[in-house]
Amino acid sequence: MILTVALSASLVLTGSPAQAATKPVTFQGFTLRVPLTWHTKKEGVNLRVITGACSPAAAECRSFLLGGPRAVRYASEGSAYQADRPYHPSSGVSECVPKKKYFSGQATRVRTSKAAFGAGQRARFTEWKVSCDGGRLNVASYTQRVWYVKAKKVIVVDHWKTPGLGAILGKAVWG
């Protein structure tokens, strides 16, 4: 019994079972290893990776978007992705992600840096704080995180601060 508990504790601390409990998600020439509980949904030419619950109050399920050349071409109000602007492909007003009864408003850049996106690839990582309003200030807000790999015309957009996503993208396999 003690040996079993010690072995279980050892596996939990080393992370071995969690590493084994993944599946591949392939998109635009790269593969990510994601938890088995996550699933994918095609959205036109993009792929949404659903990571958690879908609340009827939210504009989207807990997820992140994998986009290719078309998503990059129409990433900023119908124009090409611009690193100094949040990802906003429509030319209209968009719903506030956590509370869809409000609209997304002002976005403030929190930080920009370079991030690994698999072996040999670097992404421009930008984090935005997006406020939502319904006639009142600061009703709600959310964080938009964007990884953009210019050389591959790939963009990843996360509105839920998905835990571990940066590390998952850092281990992407291109091929």
Image: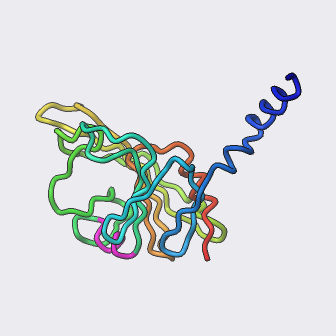
Please state which of residues 119 and 113 is positioned toward the viewer in this rendering: 119
Please state which of residues 8 and 19 is positioned toward the viewer in this rendering: 8
* Way the structure is coloured: rainbow
- Residue lying at the far right of the rendered structure: 3
Residue 20 versus residue 175 in the image, above or below: above
Please state which of residues 141 and 44 is positioned toward the viewer in this rendering: 44
Please state which of residues 49 and 103 is positioned toward the viewer in this rendering: 49
In the image, which residues are magenta? 69-75
The percent position of residue 172, horizontal first and vertical second, equals 60, 63
Residue 132 versus residue 144 in the image, above or below: above
The percent position of residue 35, horizontal first and vertical second, equals 57, 49
Q: How many marks?
A: 0
Viewed as shown, does residue 8 lie left or right of 102? right
Instruction: Name the image quarter holding the C terminus.
Output: bottom right
Q: Residue at left 32%, top 74%?
A: 73
The percent position of residue 169, horizontal first and vertical second, equals 57, 58
The kind of secondary structure the magenta stretch mainly shows is helix
- Residue lying at the far left of the rendered structure: 135
Viewed as shown, does residue 32 lie left or right of 90? right
Q: Residue 1 sits in which quadrant? A: top right
Residue 119 versus residue 64 in the image, above or below: below
Q: Residue at left 27%, top 65%?
A: 76
Q: Is residue 70 magenta?
A: yes
Q: Is residue 4 magenta?
A: no
Q: Residue at left 61%, top 53%?
A: 22
The percent position of residue 171, horizontal first and vertical second, equals 64, 60
Q: Residue 7 sits in which quadrant? A: top right
- Residue lying at the far front of the rendered structure: 1
Viewed as shown, does residue 66 lie left or right of 141? right
Q: Residue at left 28%, top 44%?
A: 97
